[in-house]
Amino acid sequence: MQINHIKNTEHLFKILKINQNFLDSKQKFFLHKNGYIIFKPSKNIKKKLKKLNLISSQLIKKEKDKGGWEGKEKHYKKGKYFEIGANRLGNLINKNKIFRSLITAPEILATAYEVIKDDIKVGGVDLRNPLRGQGRQRIHIDWLPRKKKNQKYIGVVCFVFLNDANKKNGPLRVVPGSHKNIGWPDDKINILKRHKKEIKICAEAGSTCVMNLNLWHAGSNNISGKPRKTILIDIRRRDQPQLLNFKKYLNKKKKEQLSNVHKYLLSIRSIDKNQKGDSFGPGDVYRKEMRKRKK
Ligand SMILES: [Fe+2]
């Protein structure tokens, strides 16, 4: 069925047959209390897991130091990796059609809508894989801090695990409930240290963890050196700029192949707002703020 015009996210859910009560009351309670939720592998992901792993590994091998720089090319120099200690890939929607089906998964869209409570769009679809003995990050948030308790949340990031994530292969660390905090984590804790309330997200391959962008989190050290490839799907409020400007970064041929559902989610239709910059994330604001504090 060809759908000509998707009016809003409610309309999108009708088309995709996503019930607004996709999450039951227990799941909603857990999500709002802790700032994240984990879903077991769906049938769709189970079917595609082997191919997703293969294609991701091929892309990592092919792109080497160039991986992950889409939208931030001005900072790239030959031999400079996007993140020291991890393989990174960016703009996956443009690279293989297998990644497209991930962004219409009901569990991630329903959770995003439950957090954002407003029209949504996809901000980015990337990959991260921590390398042996590396991958530990400082505790951070993936958005700007809230300034008031009643300020709404902007989005979520979904971690689709392509390999089993266990305590030894560099799992995601999160501090449950910390999305409710006001200000940067740096205001309250030593972001270099382990947080006493942090937990490591261990899950079988194919599982998805959906996390509020304001939850305190970090990567941890990959002790075993086993792969822990994770697809990162950023979903944000529709009036916000994207992590990657898809109107600019998807090529013409790829855009033509996309369904109207995908065009809506990626915000690439002529009626969708044009974005000035190539990429928007909290990084620049954070660095500026921390420089100011040092002075
Ligand atoms: Fe992060």
Image (cartoon, rainbow, N blue to C red):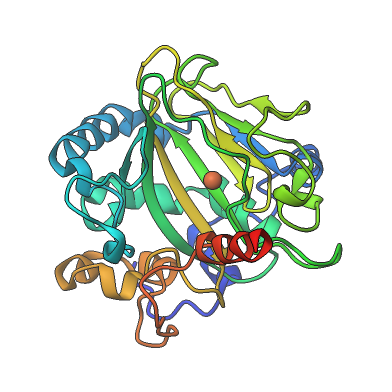
Q: Quadrant of the N terminus?
A: bottom left
Is 75 placed above or below 272 here? Answer: above
In this rendering, the answer to whether 95 lies above or below 250 is above
**Residue 21 locus on image (x, y percent):** 70, 51
Quarter location, residue 153:
bottom right
Residue 143 x/y as whole percent: 60, 59
Asked if residue 170 is positioned above or below residue 224 in the image, the reply reads: below
Q: Nearer the viewer, residue 158 or 285?
A: 285
Question: In the image, residue 80 lies at what x, y percent?
Answer: 25, 47
Q: Residue furthest front?
A: 295
The quadrant where residue 256 appears: bottom left
The residue nearer to you, when weighing 294 against 247, is 294
Task: Tell me where residue 218 appears, x and y as whole percent.
Answer: 58, 37
What residue sits 76% from the left and 41% below the top?
Answer: 189
Q: Residue at x 53, y 36 (%)?
A: 137
Q: Residue at x 39, y 23 (%)?
A: 163
Question: Looking at the rendering, in which quadrant would you find the C terminus?
Answer: bottom right
Of the pair 150 and 284, the residue shown nearer to us: 284
